[in-house]
Amino acid sequence: MEKVLMKGNEALAESAMRAGCRFFFGYPITPQTELAAYMSKKMPKVGGTYLQAESEVAAINMVYGASAAGARVMTSSSSPGISLKGEGISYMAGADLPGVIINVQRGGPGLGGIQPSQSDYFQATKATGHGDFQVVVYAPSTVQEMSDIVYEAFDVADKYRTPVMILADGMLGQMMEPVVLPEPKNPEDLPAKPWACTGHEGKRAHNVVNSLYLTAEALEQLNVERYQRYDQIKATELRAEAYLTEDADIVLVAFGASARVARSAVNAARAEGIKAGLLRPITLWPFPAEAMEATIDSAKEYLVVEMNMGQMVEDVRLCVEGRRPVGFFGRCGGIIPTPAEVLGQIRQIHERLAAEGE
């Protein structure tokens, strides 16, 4: 196995190509530009196509076209760019087209800033675009996980014929860590896509890729069938990591870069004799409700840590259903919470719980 030192953005690009991605359409925006730059250099060397589109809107529609032709295809951007891609993502979902979309988040709303953020959680998990649909959303927390998840994301996208989003952030995109890269796949060895528009040569019926259905009954039936696939995803693709939660009185819930900070705070709390643990959702949609439920018996209180004003905390509260208090600590605008700040929050909860138990 090959081990190299790579930026998160570069690891995403390299592993995507190793997963059989041969088409990339994007547009530069900080802090994901290194991903596109890496693709521009390497994609031609593996017989692929890199194209910097004239806009984010053009890029996502190129993704639509390449996917409809059966290709493994990816695009990447950062927060404002993903908003521009929203219509095209909805079209892909409506046409049941697979594809991988990378969001290396920056602060917002609007142009915001170029520092790391997690303020696109709502957009990714609740309203990526218009209509009744979801996309599978993964939240890596290390450069190694960036590599592993994007490699797997193409398989998930193809299996369920759905867009898949990797929700990273500027911290993970820019940091460097050792990575064991996956084995390259030959695109010719990938499973066939009998639904794709590849030319029928008079041997089969025409394939039609479309998201427009003017008959209400037909559109309803397609949406119902799509949600049946979503149920399959919920049953088979949920992922989360539990760290020291078995006996934890205080369970932190954090994803992505915030989970790295929270893990350090948990270790510091344990060193002080405070029973803290961490639950890290890896799939943000579907949200790992079963993993949350597994912590409910030991937990006396939850603390959600995010780089936003409070977004995933709502899903945690839905899972907990009022059975335990759920607190929130967040920094936003591109400020990364520190382990000391999170440890301070843990201490406050611990002291209050101790006082209530006296």
Image: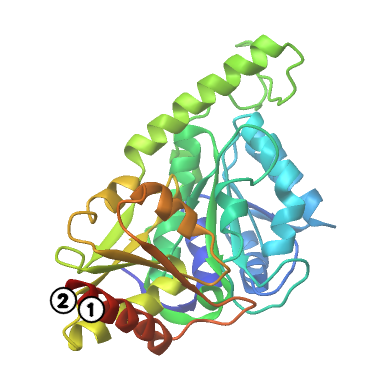
Res. 358 mark? 2
* Observer-nearest of 148 and 283: 283
Q: Is residue 195 left or right of residue 40?
A: left
Do the residues under discs 1 and 2 have CB atoms within 8 angstroms?
Answer: yes
Q: Residues within 10 Å of mark 2 (few under 14, many from 20)?
A: few
Q: Residues within 10 Å of mark 1 (few under 14, many from 20)?
A: few
* Observer-nearest of 302 and 14: 302
Give the Cα separation between the discs numbered 1 and 2.
5 Å
Residue drawn at x 67%, y 23% as measured from the top left: 199
Res. 302 mark? none
Q: Position of residue 239 (x, y in %)?
A: 34, 51
Residue drawn at x 40%, y 79% as measured from the top left: 261
Q: Position of residue 338 (x, y in %)?
A: 44, 86
Residue drawn at x 39%, y 71% as measured from the top left: 259
Q: Quadrant of the N terminus?
A: bottom left
The vertical placement of 201 against 156, above or below, is: above
* Observer-nearest of 214 and 263: 263
Instruction: Give the labeled residue for mark 1.
Output: 355
Query: Residue flagged by tag 2: what amino acid is it?
Result: Glu
Point out the residue furthest to the right here.
54
